[in-house]
Amino acid sequence: MQLTSSTWTELDQVETNLALLPVGSTEQHGPHAPLGTDTLNAEAVAEAAAERYPDPVVVAPAVPVAVAEEHRQFTGTLWTDESTFRAYVRDIVASLAAHGWDRVVLVNGHGGNVAALREVAGRIVRHDDAYAVPFTWFDEVDAEENMGHGGPLETALLQHANPETVHEDRLTEAAEGGSDRWGDWQGRTNLAFDSDEFTENGVVGDPRDGSADLGEELLSGAADALAALLDTVAERDPNPRAE
């Protein structure tokens, strides 16, 4: 059930301890995709998983601003530092747990959030009355080599789930002004800290290789993986040695 579209009386009748918290970002994704790409994609995966899961799952509103300072030179990008981000996510999980939804999957759509989400989930499990685990959708669809940024996979998921947000007439411009690799490398060392150091328009990868059909496959695979994770989270004992 979606928190934002449900009444409190409806949610008061829901018998579940499972919740999904989509976590995205507001950052440039080239000339063809919106700044909310990561948020939209995280929401799409969370909603699809909740729909196919056999038991009720609460879906919280997405976190739209996160760890994205690496895109700061591109107009419209918003960011916060990791400590503020971790504290905010932890507070939201605590709020969910206060209503009994104390097993929370953090459904992530932005690579820059990965380390911070892993750390805050550990803090929650060790110190709070809740259990949280991060889930990054593109890690579940073998996306490492083709992920890019505003590249084929992110674009494809948008083309399927939110097609009105993609400027199809700008895909060639996006590809021609982009980079084929994230970073500026010397051996195994990435010399770049910000994306404008290696991509002219913010794109990494060729978004022309995406399609709505590919996006449908990606959404299905990610949602299946998330539903399977919900099963495990529902049964897992996070403190096996506790008395």
Image (cartoon, grey):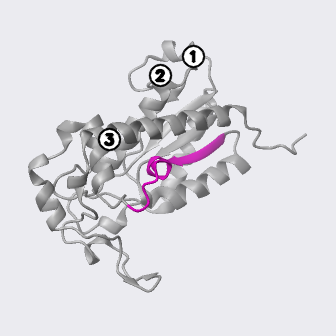
Residue 28 in percent (x, y) is at 25, 58
Q: Which residue carries the number 1 mark?
A: 14
Q: Of helix, strand and loop, which one carries label 1?
A: loop
Amino acid on which the number 2 mark rests in the picture: Met
Task: State which quadrant residue 213 falls in.
Answer: top left
Q: Of discs 3 and 2, which sits in the foreground?
A: 3
Q: Which residue carries the number 3 mark?
A: 215
**Residue drawn at (40%, 62%), measured in percent from left and top?**
145
Q: Are marks 1 and 2 in contact (CB under 8 Å)?
A: yes
**Residue drawn at (67%, 39%), measured in percent from left and top?**
130
Could you classify mark 2 by the number of other residues whose Cα lies within 10 Å: few (under 14), some (14-19), or many (20 or more)?
A: some
Residue 26 in percent (x, y) is at 31, 52
Amino acid on which the number 1 mark rests in the picture: Val
| Quadrant, the C terminus | top right
Task: State which quadrant residue 221 falls in.
Answer: top left
Q: Which of the two discs, 3 and 2, labels the residue nearer the N terminus?
A: 2
Q: Of discs 1 and 3, which sits in the foreground?
A: 3
Amino acid on which the number 3 mark rests in the picture: Gly
Distance of label 1 from label 2 (alpha carbons)? 9 Å
Q: Are marks 1 and 3 in contact (CB under 8 Å)?
A: no
Residue 43 appears in the rendering: no
Distance of label 3 from label 2 (alpha carbons)? 24 Å
Could you classify mark 1 by the number of other residues whose Cα lies within 10 Å: few (under 14), some (14-19), or many (20 or more)?
A: few
What is the number of the mark on residue 1?
Answer: 2
Considering depth in this image, is 156 or 197 the residue closer to the camera? 156
Magenta-colored span: 131-145
Indicate left or right for 73 with 87 as reference.
left
As displayed, is residue 221 above or below residue 58? below
**Residue drawn at (24%, 69%), measured in percent from left and top?**
73
Considering depth in this image, is 19 or 204 the residue closer to the camera? 204
